[in-house]
Amino acid sequence: MFQIDFNKLRFLVCDDNPHMRRILRTLLHSFGTREVYESEDGATALEMYTHCVPDIVITDWSMPIFDGLELAQMIRQPESKGNPYAPIIMLTGHSEKRRVTVARDAGVTEFLAKPISAKGLYQRILNVVAHPRPFIKTKTYFGPDRRRNTNNTYIGPERRVGGEVEVMQQPSLLDKARSGV
Amino acid sequence: MAKQNPPALQIETFADHHVITQPNPLRKVLRRAAEKDLDDPVARAEKALAALSGEFKNWMAVESKRLAAAYAAILKNGFTDRACQELFRAAHDIKGDAATFGFPFAGDAAESLCRIIEHAPNLGAVPPQLIEHHVDAIEAIVEERTRLNTVTTASELSRKLRGVADEYLMQVNRDRPEHLEAILAPSLVPAG
């Protein structure tokens, strides 16, 4: 059986509602997390994302000025200096299917509709820790693979064009920095 | 954990997309534990949430007052963009929080109000009583929760508000198929 060492995880929580931030902080601390950074808007969250380097981001959608969707889009910039691959869990009162699609297309890793539950949050965290998906980069999308269903029963048209596969090994960012690239 | 070196990426290039895989950077936080040593973080978190629940009624009262203030601002200054956004955010927060705080029917009424704000073609043309009754109902549900029979009344009230709101929205959106589709689409959250 596997367990998550929550005390090794660093979270960034972004929600404009102080009550929801308190709930999230309570849940994460009781899971065992020590480091929970909080922001009440997307702009501050983006700044904290760069400085605090969280392992997992949990964000609300609807916030003033700079919302959670924009935050996800800003994080998922493949050329950005920060880490564009961190898991993003969208925790929102929006509960319509079309919203899930929009969030998914913005690069959100997991979607959790409110009302929040300890079990729901734990499962989303376990999913991003234990089963990370590869990232897909196209002209219009950069984010976790939107195809979660890996069985071969799909019978529609293939929308991704295949071709010769070229595997490139990339050095880590730290190695790049050390070699002065 | 976050201070670790970023792992090397493996990139597979196809005609119109790249598949980028990195060794799981969070793998080290997963540890194997014998069944007898497993703890239950979910139960621990639920207990912590229960310990916090004494504050929920006050929090809900704050949220409900924020909604009433947002509506009062609209009555005073009209349906400005800023005022409408604040009304929506206040209702949307209640929709998301209320069930956690033990007020599921206030959440249902708030969801109905959110749908009106999102899908009415012109908020200024919505019958004033429709918005007002939602705001009043949420306040009443929050204030009267401790009285007997309020669960039934709150349930009935939120159900009727949703019925009236949906009827209105379907009528005013009859020529706006994308809104009609959204109004009729089922919610991801199972009904309480």
Image (cartoon, coloured by chain):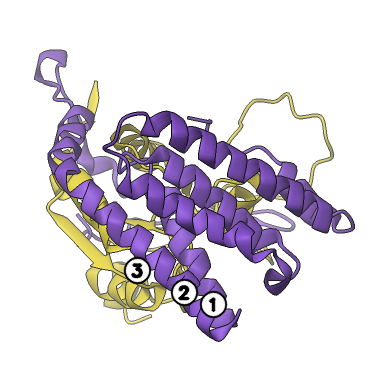
Chain colours: A yellow, B purple
Q: Residues within 10 Å of mark 1 (few under 14, many from 20)?
A: few
Give x and y (percent) for residue A62: 48, 64
Q: Chain of mark 1?
A: B
Q: CA distance from mark 3 to mark 1?
A: 55 Å
Q: Quadrant of the C terminus of chain A?
A: bottom left
Q: Residues within 10 Å of mark 2 (few under 14, many from 20)?
A: some
Q: Tag 3's secondary structure?
A: helix
- The label shown at residue B75 is 1
Locate residue A40 relative to residue B85 in the image: left or right: left
Give x and y (percent) for residue A2: 24, 26
Disc 2, disc 1: CB below 8 Å?
Answer: yes
- The label shown at residue A173 is 3
Give x and y (percent) for residue B34: 14, 17
Q: Chain of mark 2?
A: B
Q: Chain of mark 3?
A: A
- Using the rendered image of the protein, determine whether residue A124 is visible from the camera's viewpoint: yes
Q: Which residue is mark 2?
A: B72
Residue at 37% across / 29% down in the picture? B149
Residue at 51% across / 47% down in the picture? B109
